[in-house]
Image (cartoon, rainbow, N blue to C red):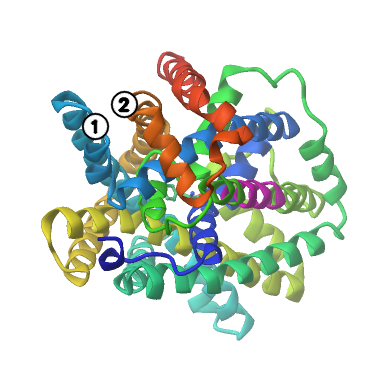
Amino acid sequence: MASSRGEFSSRLGFIMAAAGSAVGLGNIWGFPTQAASNGGAAFLLAYLVLAFTLAYPALMAELIIGRHAHANAVGALRLISIGPKTRFLGTCSGSIGFIVASLILSFYAIVAGWMVALGLSSLAGLVGLSDLSQWLGEFGLVRNIVFMLIFMGLTIGIITGGVQEGIERWSTRLMPILLVALVLLVAYVLTLDGAGEGLKVYLLPDFDQIFTPKLIIAALGSAFFSLSLGVGTMLIYGSYISDKENLSVLGGWVTLIDISIAVLAGFLVLPAMYVALHNGVEIFTASGALISEDTLIFTVLPELFATMGLAGVIVSVVFFVLMSIAALTSSISMLEVPVAYTIEEHGVSRRTAVIAIGSAIAVCSTIILFNFETLFGLVVAITTRYSQPLLGFVFCMYAGWVWHRDNLLQELQKGNPGAEHTLFWKIWPWYVRLVCPIIILTIFVQSVIG
Ligand code: PHE
């Protein structure tokens, strides 16, 4: 079965694809802006702790279940179920996962479209097409729809190619470019006046904020979103890993790359904000709060680039290309969730599934764009604040309680015969059984009632 459904050709291929999924707008846009408005280093600290202690074990739950079943989330949860109730719950959770993945893609494609448009806007400005540059840079309905469609077209094109020819090939091409662009940008921004102030905010914790529920909820949400958890993406990528691979090491690499890139992006965005302040761009409101955190990147950064002359144009192009690449390697992993489900559960061809589902998601994005004020924030909150942690919880419960411990060990031993003697096996099983579900639930309840 495994060979007919595609498999990553190498360890590097998987790491690039999974890190590509994980590293996205969440890291380069979400994490730094959240850090900026939640006490800088205090947020960084909470994020690091939560990512290693909660998100990594939850990621492993998805990877192990996926690799064992070599199937989509619905098929996989059913396979490890022990009776009609858990089978039913598995079918429901897997199905909700594919709906949530599609909804995330429907808002993600909109934001990614902005990135492509803003990059092109800077390019158009560079070659003197100022009208075009202005149109591309402004928040208009037509521009938003056109660029959402372009971005969805790219995502559909890659996913039509399948696991090796599509996901793996493009992730291994794009991820190194992303890393180089990010490092160059950080190096450049850190040389500018005002950057030091941003570094201080990023690296010196504001201890008053460190244990506030708001900060912890934001950090957990950020870590879950950033590692692409709780929608079945990592489960489906896990299902394409060969049985020869050592899963805990692969998962560790993906977590490490994801966290490092988020932290690195913080070294770009926070210093850039203070460079902007230094150059006279307004970044705080009269009350001292940060200007609308969600739009920070679209307002503060372009204004900053504008104060930097020619260098600003080049930096701007590189920055938005970086954002577009990060978004694309993530969006393909979102589309793969409903596509894999439809191919495997309904026997549809990949091409048909990709085109039908991709088009349906584009329609959802268009509806969101037409009702932006009411729908955008709502879809983001429902999917990322509520559904992702809850489904992450369900995956942990299946790995920790439903699935038999011996089978778990057997799965790990496939790629690592000495798995039972590893530190991972001493800690992870009870962690995913008790610690993860309890903490996820506590934080979730806090976020609902708080
Ligand atoms: N991890 C991606 C990011 O950081 C977002 C994502 C969420 C991707 C869920 C897939 C599934 O931007």
- Taking the spot 17% from the left edge, 26% from the top edge, the residue there is 83
Ligand 1 lies under 8 Å from the Cβ of mark 1: no
Magenta segment:
254-265
- Taking the spot 48% from the left edge, 44% from the top edge, the residue there is 413
User: How many C-alpha atoms fall within 10 Å of the one at disc 2: few (<14), some, or many (≥20)?
Assistant: some
Residue holding disc 2: 402
The reply, left or right, for residue 215 in relation to residue 331 is right
Residue type at tag 1: Ser
The reply, left or right, for residue 290 in relation to residue 61 is right
Magenta portion: prevailing SS class: helix
> In terms of secondary structure, where does tag 1 sit?
loop
Are the residues flagged by discs 2 and 1 in contact, CB closer than 8 Å? yes
Upstream in the sequence, badge 2 or badge 1?
A: 1
Disc 2 to disc 1, C-alpha distance: 6 Å
> In terms of secondary structure, where does tag 2 sit?
helix
The furthest residue to the front = 417
Which residue occupies the foreground of this view, 276 or 43? 43
Percent x, y of residue 156: 31, 69
Q: Is residue 159 magenta?
A: no
- Taking the spot 51% from the left edge, 65% from the top edge, the residue there is 324
Residue type at tag 2: Val
User: How many C-alpha atoms fall within 10 Å of the one at disc 1: few (<14), some, or many (≥20)?
Assistant: some
Which residue occupies the foreground of this view, 317 or 66? 66
Which residue occupies the foreground of this view, 276 or 100? 100
Residue holding disc 1: 81
